[in-house]
Amino acid sequence: MEQLLYDYSSRNRADDSILPTFYKLLIMPLVTVLVVLIVVGILLWLINTYIPMDRKIKSILNVVVVVVLVIWLLQAFGLLNSLKGIRI
């Protein structure tokens, strides 16, 4: 009986060692993406709120930031690399 409990507990420790690796591979990039989106959003809000600029320039800035973020997100999730093989 004690041997069965020992085997079960050692097996759980082996499974637990796989779990942090999985979290590092999955959760950390998602946290990075979330942090980048929040920081860029706050910076863009600060620029739009506190820096006096013409409305047209602010809209161009907003569009450029959104386009760059979309391209970065596509690259971060690996979708941009799959588009490189397409020829027109």
Image (cartoon, rainbow, N blue to C red):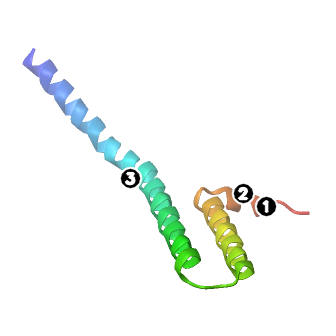
Residue that carries the numbered disc 3 in the rendered image: 24
Asked if the residue under mark 1 is in contact with the one under mark 2, i.e. CB atoms within 8 Å, the reply is yes
Q: Hey, which residue is sitting farthest top in the picture?
A: 1
Residue type at mark 1 is Gly
Tell me the SS state at disc 1.
Answer: loop
Quarter residue 75 falls in: bottom right
Residue 47 percent across, percent down from the top left = 55, 78
Residue that carries the numbered disc 1 in the rendered image: 85
Identity of the residue drawn at 66% across and 72% down = 62
**Figure quadrant of the C terminus:** bottom right
* Camera-side residue of 4 and 37: 37
Dot placed on the residue nearer the N-terminal end, 1 or 3: 3
Q: Is residue 73 left or right of residue 59?
A: left
* Camera-side residue of 70 and 52: 52
Residue 61 percent across, percent down from the top left = 67, 77
Residue type at mark 2 is Ser
**Figure quadrant of the N terminus:** top left
Tell me the SS state at disc 3.
Answer: helix
Q: How far apart are marks 1 and 3 (CA)?
A: 29 Å
Q: Hey, which residue is sitting farthest right in the picture?
A: 88
Residue that carries the numbered disc 2 in the rendered image: 82
Q: How far apart are marks 2 and 1 (CA)?
A: 6 Å
Identity of the residue drawn at 58% across and 61% down = 76
Dot placed on the residue nearer the N-terminal end, 2 or 3: 3
Residue type at mark 3 is Lys
